[in-house]
Image (tube, rainbow, N blue to C red):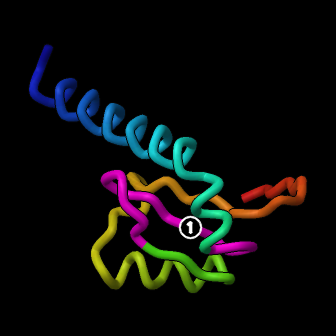
Amino acid sequence: MSREQDSVFQRLQGFQRDIDYYEAHRAELLDRYPEQWVAIFNEQVAGTDHDAERLLRRLEEQGTPLERALIKRLTTKEELFIL
């Protein structure tokens, strides 16, 4: 495996860990941040906000790589978002 392939593989594994973290903690996150957007990065909450664009700006300001963060809307409602 080349160095570039290894780097991509490591990023994918990190993203999967963030998905697993979200799924394992979804109920707790929903209780704490209802009806908000949440960003998970490195198995931690990197930010939350009611406004997705504001959350993205804050993540950029703090140096969180948007392309590697898991961003989800915490809600009990069935919603469809087209981004």
The image quadrant where one finds the C terminus is bottom right
Q: Disc 1 marks which residue?
A: 38
**Extreme residue in the left direction:** 3
Task: Quadrant for residue 23, please give it.
Answer: top right
Question: Which image quadrant is residue 63 in?
Answer: bottom left
Which region is colored magenta? 33-46
The one nearer the camera, 24 or 69, is: 24
Magenta span dominant secondary structure:
strand
Quarter location, residue 34 = bottom right
Quarter placement of the N terminus:
top left
Q: Please report the residue visible at 56 percent of the width from the left and 67 percent of the height from the top.
A: 38
Amino acid tagged 1: Val
Q: Position of residue 64 (x, y in %)?
A: 33, 68
Q: Is residue 63 above or below residue 22?
A: below
Q: Is residue 1 magenta?
A: no
Q: Residue at x 24, y 33 (%)?
A: 10
User: Is 38 situated left or right of 69 in this image?
Assistant: right
Q: Residues within 10 Å of mark 1 (few under 14, many from 20)?
A: many
Pinpoint residue 39: horizontal percent, then vertical percent. 49, 64
Residue 36 drawn in magenta? yes
Q: In the figure, 72 relative to 47: above or below?
A: above
The location of residue 74, given as percent across then percent down, is 69, 63
Q: Residue at x 38, y 38 (%)?
A: 17
Provide the secondary structure element on which disc 1 rests. strand
Left of 11 or right of it: where is 47?
A: right
